[in-house]
């Protein structure tokens, strides 16, 4: 168990969002090209997920309503684009790409739990953290990380899962799916106010899940120092109290200072330090089990450099 998994399928590139859409296939192309150019690809255990497993719809239905699954399949166009909302579209290949994105996260989960990987990064699209139980939104169709959390619990008998979301936008879908569940802790640090308008500090779970959601909204312009401070002062105590058995990262890189869709000032160094901090907690509480899944990031060079830094630090985990 000395490798970092890289989960990627070329069919993720077939999810066509149309011209000028920020969440386009060129994002993944930029990432893969950067990993090749820097030699990181050769150091990773690259895995192409197989076709969607026969029971994949059952696993997706653990977090999405069955009628939503049926509706999304019906929305798939035979040609051109089908617009779900102002930001979210489907092309003829989008439905399969979304299934493969979920399959990729489950493949990574299996690989970590079996000892094939020490940790893994899923270079998938469409992203997922805005997708709610019965609604696609914010470029997202299925909530990849949420499905992985339930899969880890039910397939691999993992008791407590922590989701750390550092995308610049609040992961409203992930929060809502788990807000009444004390076995999944959801943490988000994000720019506020910003799309989708959720993620206030007063949102901390409901009913049995009260206290198992932690939002740390930040005003525009915050950078590495402020993010690391949030991790140290707010997230660290939550991790130590919750004692997760597995950590999932909703790894958006749109808090980068160059990103066009937000107004934060994080650098590659900041993402690297956040990665190292999460790894340290994972070593302490969950045998180093970290599964990272791509969310946002829309400046191609900044995205590619940030992912490369994130993977470099995953590879160089102590004890690797």
Image: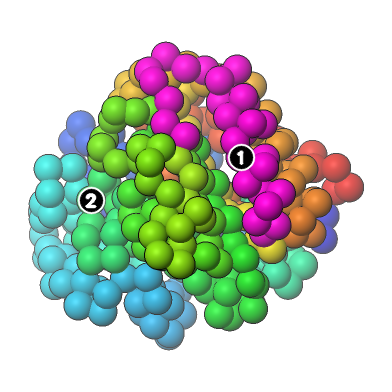
Q: Quadrant of residue 156?
A: bottom right
Name the front one of labels 1 and 2.
Answer: 1
Counting from the top left corner in percent of width and height, residue 138 is at 26, 45
Residue of label 1: 235
Residue positioned 35% across, 37% down in the render = 200
Secondary element at tag 1: helix
Which of disc 2 and disc 1 is earlier in sequence? Answer: 2
Counting from the top left corner in percent of width and height, residue 308 is at 61, 33
Query: 129 or 299, which lies in front?
Result: 129
The tally of labels here is 2
Residue of label 2: 137
**Looking at the figure, which quarter contains the N terminus?**
bottom right
Residue 262 visible = yes
Residue positioned 58% across, 29% down in the render = 230
Which residue of the protein is positioned furthest toward the right in this rendering?
Answer: 319
Residue positioned 62% across, 66% down in the render = 160
Which residue of the protein is positioned furthest toward the bottom in this rendering?
Answer: 54
- Residues under labels 1 and 2: Cα distance? 27 Å
Coloring applied to the structure: rainbow
Query: 110 or 24, which lies in front?
Result: 110
- Per the picture, the main secondary structure of the magenta-coloured stretch is helix
Counting from the top left corner in percent of width and height, residue 153 is at 57, 74
Q: Which residues are magenta?
A: 216-244
Q: Which mark is residue 142?
A: none
Is residue 170 shown in magenta?
A: no
* 252 displayed left or right of 312: left
């Amino acid at each position: 168990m000395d490798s970092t998994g890289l989960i990627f399928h070329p069919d993720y590139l077939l999810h066509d969002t149309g011209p000028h859409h920020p969440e386009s296939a060129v994002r993944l192309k930029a990432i893969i090209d950067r990993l090749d150019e820097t030699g990181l690809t050769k150091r990773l255990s690259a895995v192409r997920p197989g076709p969607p497993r026969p029971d994949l719809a059952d696993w997706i239905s653990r977090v999405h309503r069955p009628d939503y699954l049926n509706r999304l399949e019906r929305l798939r166009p035979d040609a051109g684009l089908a617009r779900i909302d102002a930001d979210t579209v489907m092309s003829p290949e989008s439905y399969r790409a979304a299934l493969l994105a979920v399959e990729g996260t489950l493949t990574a989960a299996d690989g970590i739990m079996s000892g094939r990987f020490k940790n893994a990064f899923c270079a998938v699209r469409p992203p997922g953290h805005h997708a709610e139980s019965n609604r696609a939104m914010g470029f997202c169709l299925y909530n990849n990380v949420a499905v992985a959390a339930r899969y880890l619990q039910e397939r691999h008998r993992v008791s407590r899962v922590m989701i750390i979301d550092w995308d610049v936008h609040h992961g409203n879908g992930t929060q809502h799916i788990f807000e009444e569940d004390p076995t999944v802790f959801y943490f988000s640090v994000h720019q506020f106010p910003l799309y989708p308008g959720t993620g206030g500090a007063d949102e901390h779970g409901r009913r049995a899940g009260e206290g198992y959601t932690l939002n740390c909204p930040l005003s525009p312009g915050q950078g590495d120092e402020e993010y690391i401070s949030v991790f140290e002062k707010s997230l660290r105590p939550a991790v130590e109290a919750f004692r997760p058995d597995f950590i999932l990262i909703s790894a958006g890189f749109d808090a980068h200072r160059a990103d066009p869709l937000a107004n934060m000032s994080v650098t590659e160094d900041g993402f690297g330090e956040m990665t190292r901090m999460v790894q340290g907690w994972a070593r302490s509480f969950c045998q180093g089990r970290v599964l990272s899944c791509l969310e946002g990031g829309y400046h191609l060079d900044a995205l590619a450099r940030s992912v490369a830094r994130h993977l470099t630090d995953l590879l160089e985990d102590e004890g690797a």
